Amino acid sequence: MNLHEYQGKDLFRAAGIPVPPGEVARTVDEAAASGERLGLPLVVKAQVLIGGRGKAGGVKVVRSVEELRREAGRILGLDIRGHQVRKVLITPASDIEKEYYAGIVLDRKYETPLLMVSPAGGVDIEEVARETPEKILRLHLDQRGLPAYRARAAASFLDPRPAVRRQLATVLLKLARVYHEHDCSLAEINPLVVTPKGEVLALDAKVVIDDNALDRHPDLAALRDLGAEDPGEVEAREKSLSYVRLDGSIGCVVNGAGLAMATMDLIHYHGGRAANFLDIGGSSNPEKVTAAMSLLTRDARVRAVLFNIFGGITRCDDVARGLLTALDRIGTKLPIVIRLTGTNEKEARDLLSARGMTALSDMDEAVRAVIARAAEAA
């Protein structure tokens, strides 16, 4: 679950990380009122759950009330890569002497959190890694979290000045605490700055919470901004489906995350592009299949649908019933390619055959077939 910048800053502030004050505004009048309380100059920052706000014109420094009202009005309603801005963060502008990057992310290869720091802050860390990888220090964390001596080492990599290093080390220790205590998969400050007075401040916050841990954090779960998320993903979550919208033309309905990933890989290998990741899970609930088809048929980019079912706990006949029920309810004309194998495979094939549908057993054949059908329907 992604948090907005202001929500991430609230977590940082509660942990003792120095963060400038700020107020969230949903209208121009609210932004102006915040400006009166906070004082000029200010920064107006679009609050959307996606990066690249600055490049899209969603972050502006203002030095007058008139400029504040004009920029707040422009940014509110702005479309940033498909995300409409519904609120802005109003925060005092800070004098900056130096910008750093600090972040902790889950390293899936080594199955452990990874602290990354760089003296080249203020830009995408991916850009730094690509162009100047020597400017990134990487430290894996263990069950102890971030020991103080490693925090000091990371701070020394960022800045040689003792007074600044001490502040940076403290911020890194508290960032590690936020990451651990809130079950994050990402906790990032970019930029982490030093002012001309030698004060360290976190000017941005990017926090991602592990969805699987939200049961332990009802206070964080309540922060989810459903209006800022893809409606299909919200609906899928309510139906207990694992769904991520992608940018291809082939809709996928698969049981099991591993098979779903393999299916998308094979589609790409054969020259196609998946429109989604969609895992109906290991249950035998036909309603899930119906919900999955409802999602895909409403996606205008989908040109053909692939059902790839390996029946273990999931029963192939229940998937077939769900598909037939969905077709009865929705009446879609999308081409559908079905691959079934495993538990109750024969019963599933009989159900489909009675409706004039056939199911393949070879995965490669099914993928090639759905790519061809999508090309025909384009």
Image (cartoon, rainbow, N blue to C red):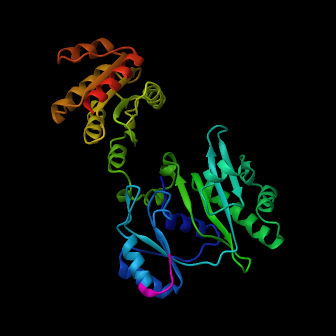
Name the residue rendered at 38%, 73% in the picture: 74
The foreground one among 73 and 33 is: 73
Displayed quadrant of residue 306? top left
Image spot of residue 24 (x, y percent): 44, 74
State the residue in front, 203 or 171.
203
Residue at 27%, 26% in the rendered image: 336
Quadrant placement of the C terminus: top left
Per the rendered image, the range of residues in magenta is: 61-66
For residue 366, side relative to residue 108 (left or right):
left
Whether residue 378 is situated above or below residue 188 in the rendered picture: above
Q: Is residue 64 magenta?
A: yes
Where does the image place residue 157, in percent across and percent down from the top left? Answer: 79, 59
Along the line of sight, the residue nearer the viewer: 306 or 287: 306
Q: Is residue 263 magenta?
A: no
Q: How many marks?
A: 0
Q: Residue at x 52, y 53 (%)?
A: 209
